[in-house]
Amino acid sequence: MPAPRKYPDELRERSVRLVQQMRREQPAEASRAISTVAKRLGVHSATLRLWVNQAEVDQGTRPGITTPDAARIAELERENRELKRANEILKAASAFFARELDPRLPG
């Protein structure tokens, strides 16, 4: 189960929109957009930078793994772990019953 989020989704979306808007309206100040918005909204600038980078990946303007793809990968990895665990249990049970049913072994 993932950790609870410190910031609400609305704040996250709003702050990313503000950064993108500032970058469009004031290209000369684009490098300071994140720190400016972060201070105004009370968000750490490193956190906001991560949000903006991920939003750019999700929009296709930056290379990387999109949020839905990352969620799907995590889901598949979780399912893979469960299947490996179930397979190990089945192998152990199969070996146990094979020994029990082997007529060559004294029993």
Image (spheres, grey):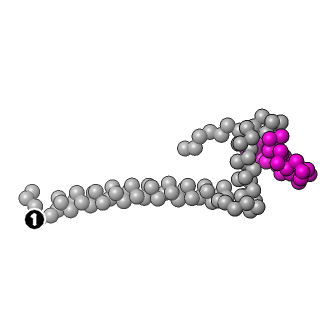
Q: Is residue 8 visible?
A: no
Q: Residues within 10 Å of mark 1 (few under 14, many from 20)?
A: few
| Residue linked to disc 1 | 104
Q: Position of residue 90 (x, y in %)?
A: 32, 59
Residue toward you, 71 or 59: 59
What residue do we see at 22% from left, 57% from top? 96
- Assign the N terminus to one quadrant of the image: top right
Q: Quadrant of residue 75?
A: bottom right
Residue toward you, 38 or 14: 38
Q: Is residue 11 visible?
A: yes
Outermost residue toward the left in this view: 106
Q: Is residue 60 left or right of residue 105?
A: right
Q: Quadrant of residue 64?
A: bottom right
The magenta span reads 9-37
Q: Is residue 62 magenta?
A: no
- Assign the C terminus to one quadrant of the image: bottom left
Magenta: main secondary structure: helix
What residue do we see at 17% from left, 58% from top? 100
Q: Is residue 84 left or right of residue 69?
A: left
Q: Is residue 105 left or right of residue 56?
A: left
Q: Secondary structure at mark 1?
A: loop
What residue do we see at 40% from left, 58% from top? 84
The type of residue carrying mark 1 is Arg
Q: Is residue 13 magenta?
A: yes
Q: Position of residue 54 (x, y in %)?
A: 71, 53
